[in-house]
Image: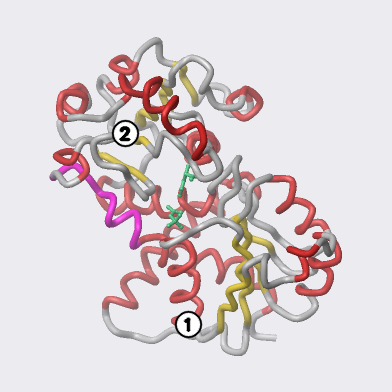
Amino acid sequence: MTRHFLTLRDCSGDELERIIARAIALKKLRAEGRQYAPLQHRTLALIFDKSSTRTRVSFEAGMTQLGGVAMFLSPNDLQLGRGEPIEDTARVISRMVDVVAIRTHEHSKVERFATHSTVPVINALTDRHHPCQLLADIQTYVERRGSIRGRVAAWVGDGNNVCHSWIDAAALFGFTLRIATPDGYAPDQNIVERAAGHVERAASFDEAITGADIVITDTWASMGQEQEKNQRIRVFEPFRVDSRAMRLATPGALFMHCLPAYRGMEVTTDVIDGPQSVVWDEAENRLHAQKALLEFLLAPTLNG
Ligand code: CP
Ligand code: NVA
């Protein structure tokens, strides 16, 4: 059966731990200058209808390093942009390439594509989830501090796509996620409920962060919410992560942000550019974690 990666829940906790361990091993291989190219003659199609720096570059560079090729397709170049159904697009493209990564707005679009695809489909970000980011983020935590099991992470700000994937991660990797958002910006209740026992809604920003091992935030206005930006800035103002907030966390706490970041908005410059910030590792690890994911998803088609 074709495996897809639309949310973290498409994998078991054990599989995710294996992917993280493999990402760390692939990072080491690259640092040693050793080539590893199991995906020769394989093609990854990247269908992106939102901007991207990290996700696009890491998938393209990662595919090259693994010996394969990545093909970037904007929907405006595809007949998809002129009304060809997503189901037909999936049937056609999956007969030609080996794996597809999609970045789009509605999560249902990646689900519809996956239903009609004969090859693995990876969610490269939707309005609802960003599972690839979490592979890199958990890898980053493990590299810096060891296992994340039993730890406390604090998500402060918008209950958005990245927050939803952190919620899934809490259940699958066995840690607690404390969440503080302004009223009206809470994460989806269904996603919270299926992580029961691993998610706590904090009464305040300070309560979420106090004693946390990780402090995480994201932009206050995600892609597609540009029109709401000014209103959101007013609402989210008390949720800025600054040095006072970081002092509430444990002394060794890490600051995480998927990037792109807006200094002076959701995080102050001294925090994101300070010693507790691991944002550049998170960004780099997108490369290694997605290489491990590609290897995992394509494993059944290799050596045979
Ligand atoms: N974090 C992340 O997905 O970044 P990009 O939007 O640049 O891909
Ligand atoms: N929440 C952000 C993440 C960007 C990587 C967005 O969806 O725009």
Which residue does the numbered mark 2 point to in the structure image?
Answer: 266
Left or right position of 55 against 152 = right
Q: Residue at x 52, y 22 (%)?
A: 186
- Mark 1 is surrounded, within 10 Å at the Cα level, by few (under 14), some (14 to 19) or many (20 or more) other residues, namely some
- Mark 2 is surrounded, within 10 Å at the Cα level, by few (under 14), some (14 to 19) or many (20 or more) other residues, namely many
Using the image, determine if residue 129 lies above or below residue 220: below
* Residue 302 image point, x, y percent: 64, 81
- Foreground label between 2 and 1: 2
Could you say which disc has been placed on residue 64 in the image? Answer: 1
Helix, strand or loop: magenta stretch: helix
Three-letter residue code for mark 1 = Thr
* Residue 2 image point, x, y percent: 75, 64
Question: Which image quadrant shows ligand 1?
Answer: bottom left
Indicate which disc, 2 or 1, sits on the residue closer to the N terminus. 1
Residue 72 visible, this angle: yes
Residue 167 forms part of the magenta stretch: no
Residue 283 forms part of the magenta stretch: yes
Left or right position of 197 against 84 = left
Q: Nearer the viewer, residue 22 or 33?
A: 33
Q: Which residues are magenta?
A: 275-284
Could you say which disc has been placed on residue 304 in the image? Answer: none
Q: Nearer the viewer, residue 133 or 151?
A: 133
Q: Residue at x 28, y 32 (%)?
A: 213
Between the residue at mark 2 and the residue at mark 1, the CA separation in whole angstroms equals: 35 Å
* Residue 244 image point, x, y percent: 16, 23
